[in-house]
Image (cartoon, helix red, strand yellow):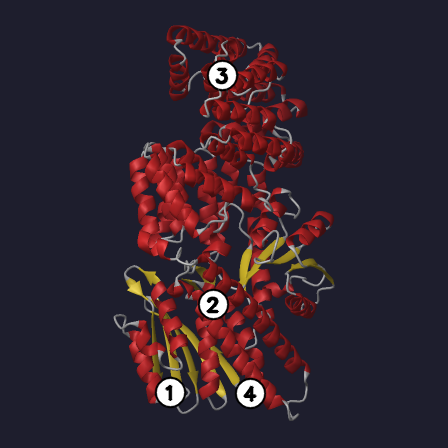
């Protein structure tokens, strides 16, 4: 037989040892699993596990840290490949260095663009040949190495350093330059530097019209108070590529900012038709439809959201609350209450009971059963009295509005004061608080309460800053610690608290305990209000204070782990 | 645009049925062609009687598979959301590796040599899966027409990247050349050359070429005779 190929070149990267890696094959079709196992054995692989369903795969993934996962998108009944991927990522079942490859019979919008947040490392279309498999494995591996240090800086939330690392890597890796610039832009956004991020996107756009770069510019304009300009840009992106699903979600956000709820609803409905299996999208659609009073559409969206959530870690209690409201408005409070009970049963912890009680009150109130609504209100008041922690701003507002509506007087006032104290310089929110008081016919009393709350917050902070400026750093640190306890979500107090801790460290030298305290304050800030410039700057100052990078990394590592745990909890909600 | 989006709401049950049937067929063909390739790599004796038949089976299986891939990629034509087009910078070395590996066993079985002429370090922006699909199809097609050589040559030509798949057979029959000429004509409707037996492959290749646009320039395909090797030549040019 004659020589088959005149050039049989193998990329240098084939030095990577694929033989010793641990593999997991996930496919519901046994023939495919056998074939893939054969291909992997030809690469020298020895440790190969197999799963025939998403559920089986999750059990194996929880037990073993695999280096490479090959997962089919279609897995019959139960979880699909995307849901396996999402759960694997959210539960941290794979190391950042390991590879997740998604396999599918066809490349479709649904299998490729279904979820923007959790992307596999690569897609492979069937049939898989050894050459394609090896090429993609090598490519992903090399890319992971190029991104390793950047990903670490990202995980440490040192966004400015991550952005600088992207620049350095981009100048050396022509092939990955575009991906590195995309990463750089997203790091700059997280660091609160939208102008710089926009320059990166615009540089990329000089080369090619990437949808994500056009969307990136539009998102920045949306955030900087130009929702109309952003709307036009998102519309243009969709007109050029009607399968760019993220464009629809963003266009809907722009419409909401413009106060055009109906248009937002239409756009979300179109997106949900193109890509129906997204829990967050169906939730947004349901919420907007409910707001518009489009009960049939809201019902359809919330039911779909619950259905696709069944096997998904993205499953959300919001869909149950939304559907309960729908049922209340359809005059079926009995069914609504049954649903709420089932939600409390399924979703443990984190204020689900409190939120279920709020929804119960709303359901009774909206279906005209004022007696039961009042009873729910009284029960809510008791729950608030026994639990000092408060839910997020929107839930607090909703609760205060409901409590006033059903005739409870003191608890809603306390809630609104709590919001005023924690957001003493957020003018739009303060105005919203005033409107809630107005609706309860308490305009004057409300105004006075808001004023007093703001003064309390300002006094507390000024005292801390005064101690700091007069050199009483120990006292300042202690004062701000108390202030944080009293006002856990006040951004100015949190930032100044971190600033005082860092100044203190700059004076006395590195101290692990104080450094960890500053880190935890900053992590909390980034959690409740991401993308703040001052956050990135303080993180950078803090990183520079560390004696050796290892010390801080481990301090932050602990912190991240703690955060990871709390994320897991909220993901189960 | 709204109408286009709405039209696939027409018959979701039928669509679900088609999608799962196709998914099933793909699995079977994957297993079939994979098993055949394994068999043929293991069979050290091409001299055995069954070998040419195995080789022909592989060729037909590949054809089936190519056609399915193309149908799936062009799904939108039968009313389903289309292909998520994703051009990214790619290295030619990686591209050719993947194309050559897909054609390897079939070439081997027919004792056909694949000549490669390109710069492995060259980077160009395109949708990798689609271009692999077009090139593998062109090579499989060349295998049908060639005597014993197929050549894949890639080079930068001004603002374009120029791919050529050539063979040393007797060249394309007139009907194919005509179909190729129609594929060049952007105005002509798809149906005209879909009636030709090689129509789907050409239609697919043309669609892929046209999806690639950069600064007012668009990709093209062409068929011609009298190439470097003397036989037929399939050309794909990407901006």
Query: What residue would you read off at disc 3?
Result: A403
Mark 2 touches mark 1? (CB < 8 Å): no
* Vertical position of residue A21 compared to residue A422: above or below: below
How many numbered circles are shown?
A: 4
Q: Single out the residue that lies furthest toward the left.
A: B187
Label 2 in the same subunit as label 1? yes
> Disc 4 or 2, which lies upstream in sequence?
2
Label 4 in the same subunit as label 3? no
Query: What residue would you read off at disc 1?
Result: B172
Residue A1 visible here: no
Q: CA distance from mark 2 to mark 3?
A: 66 Å
Category of crowding for the residue at label 4, using alpha-carbon neighbours closer than 10 angstroms: few (below 14), some (14–19), many (at least 20): some
On screen, residue B20 versus residue A286, left or right, reads right
Q: CA distance from mark 4 to mark 3?
A: 81 Å
Please, which chain is the residue tagged with disc 1 on? B
Mark 2 touches mark 3? (CB < 8 Å): no
Query: What residue would you read off at disc 4?
Result: B110
Question: Of tags 4 and 2, which is closer to the observer?
Answer: 4
The N terminus of chain A is located in which quarter? bottom right
Query: What residue would you read off at disc 2?
Result: B92
SS of the residue under disc 3: helix
* Vertical position of residue B79 compared to residue A433: above or below: below
**Which of the 4 quarters of the picture holds residue A552?**
top right
**Horizontal and vertical percent position of residue B66:** 48, 74
> Disc 1 or 4, which lies upstream in sequence?
4
Category of crowding for the residue at label 1, using alpha-carbon neighbours closer than 10 angstroms: few (below 14), some (14–19), many (at least 20): many
């Amino acid at each position: 037989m004659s020589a088959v190929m005149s050039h049989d070149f193998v990329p240098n990267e084939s030095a990577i040892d694929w033989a010793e890696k641990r593999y997991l094959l996930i496919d519901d079709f046994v023939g495919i699993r056998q074939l893939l196992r054969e291909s992997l054995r030809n690469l020298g692989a020895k440790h190969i596990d197999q799963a025939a369903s998403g559920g089986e795969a999750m059990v194996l993934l929880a037990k073993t840290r695999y280096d490479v996962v090959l997962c089919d998108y279609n897995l019959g009944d139960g979880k699909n490949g995307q849901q396996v991927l999402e759960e694997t990522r959210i539960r941290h079942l794979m190391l950042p260095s390991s590879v997740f490859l998604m396999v599918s019979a066809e490349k479709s919008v649904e299998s490729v663009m279904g979820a923007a947040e959790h992307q596999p490392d690569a897609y492979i279309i069937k049939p898989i040949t050894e050459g394609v498999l090896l090429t993609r494995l090598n490519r992903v591996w090399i890319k992971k190495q190029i991104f390793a240090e950047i990903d670490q800086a990202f995980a440490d939330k040192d966004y400015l350093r991550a952005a600088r690392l992207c620049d350095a890597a981009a100048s050396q890796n022509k092939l990955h330059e575009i991906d590195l610039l995309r990463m750089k832009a997203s790091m700059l956004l997280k660091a609160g530097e939208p102008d710089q991020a926009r320059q990166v996107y615009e540089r990329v756009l000089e080369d090619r019209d990437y949808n994500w770069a056009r969307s990136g510019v539009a998102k920045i304009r949306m955030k900087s108070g130009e929702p109309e300009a952003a709307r036009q840009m998102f519309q243009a992106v969709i007109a050029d590529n009607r399968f760019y699903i993220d464009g629809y979600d963003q266009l809907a956000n722009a419409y909401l900012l413009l106060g055009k709820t109906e248009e937002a609803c239409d756009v979300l409905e179109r997106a949900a038709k193109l890509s129906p299996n997204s829990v967050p999208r169906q939730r947004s659609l349901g919420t907007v439809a409910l707001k518009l009073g489009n009960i049939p559409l809201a019902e359809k969206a919330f039911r779909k959201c619950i259905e696709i959530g069944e096997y998904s870690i993205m499953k959300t209690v919001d869909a149950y609350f939304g559907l309960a409201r729908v049922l209340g408005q359809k005059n079926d409070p009995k069914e609504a209450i049954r649903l709420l009970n089932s939600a409390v049963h399924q979703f443990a912890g984190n204020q689900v009971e409190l939120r279920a009680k709020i929804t119960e009150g709303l359901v009774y109130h909206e279906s005209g059963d004022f007696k039961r609504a009042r009873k729910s209100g009284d029960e809510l008041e008791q729950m608030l009295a026994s639990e000092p922690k408060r839910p997020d701003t929107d839930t607090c507002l909703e609760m205060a509005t409901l409590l006033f509506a059903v005739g409870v007087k003191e608890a809603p006032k306390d809630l609104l004061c709590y919001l005023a104290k924690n957001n003493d310089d957020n003018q739009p929110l303060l105005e919203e608080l005033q409107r809630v008081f107005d609706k309860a016919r308490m305009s004057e009393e409300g105004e006075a309460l808001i004023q007093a709350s703001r003064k309390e917050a300002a006094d507390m902070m000024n005292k801390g800053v005064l101690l700091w400026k007069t050199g009483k750093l120990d006292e300042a640190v202690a004062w701000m610690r108390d202030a944080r306890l009293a006002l856990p979500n006040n951004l100015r107090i949190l930032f100044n608290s971190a600033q005082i801790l860092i100044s203190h460290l700059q004076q006395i030298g590195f101290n692990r305990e104080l450094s960890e305290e500053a880190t935890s304050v900053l992590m909390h800030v980034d959690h409740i209000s991401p993308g703040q410039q001052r956050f990135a700057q303080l993180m950078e100052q803090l990183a520079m204070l560390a004696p050796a990078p290892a010390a801080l990394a481990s301090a932050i590592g602990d912190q991240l782990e703690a955060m990871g745990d709390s994320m897991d909890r909220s993901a189960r909600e | 645009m709204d109408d286009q989006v709405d039209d696939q709401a027409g018959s979701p049950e039928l669509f679900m049925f088609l999608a799962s049937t196709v998914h099933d067929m793909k699995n079977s063909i994957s297993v079939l062609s994979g098993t055949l390739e394994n068999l043929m790599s293991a069979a050290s004796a091409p001299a055995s009687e069954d070998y040419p038949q195995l080789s022909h089976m592989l060729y037909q299986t590949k054809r089936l598979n190519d056609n399915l891939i193309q149908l799936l990629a062009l799904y939108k034509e039968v009313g389903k959301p289309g292909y998520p087009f994703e051009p990214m910078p790619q290295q030619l070395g990686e591209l050719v590796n993947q194309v050559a590996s897909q054609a390897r066993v079939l070439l081997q079985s027919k004792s056909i040599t694949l000549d490669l002429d390109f710069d492995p370090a060259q980077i160009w922006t395109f949708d990798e899966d689609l271009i692999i699909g077009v090139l593998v199809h062109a090579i499989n097609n060349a295998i049908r027409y060639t005597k014993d050589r197929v050549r894949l040559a890639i080079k930068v030509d001004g603002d374009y990247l120029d791919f050529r798949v050539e063979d040393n057979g007797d060249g394309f029959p007139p009907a194919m050349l005509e179909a190729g000429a129609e594929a060049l004509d952007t105005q002509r409707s798809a149906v005209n050359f879909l009636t030709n037996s090689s129509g789907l492959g050409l239609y697919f290749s043309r669609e892929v070429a046209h999806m690639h646009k950069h600064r007012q320039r668009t990709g093209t395909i062409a068929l011609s005779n009298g190439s470097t090797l003397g036989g037929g030549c399939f050309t794909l040019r990407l901006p």
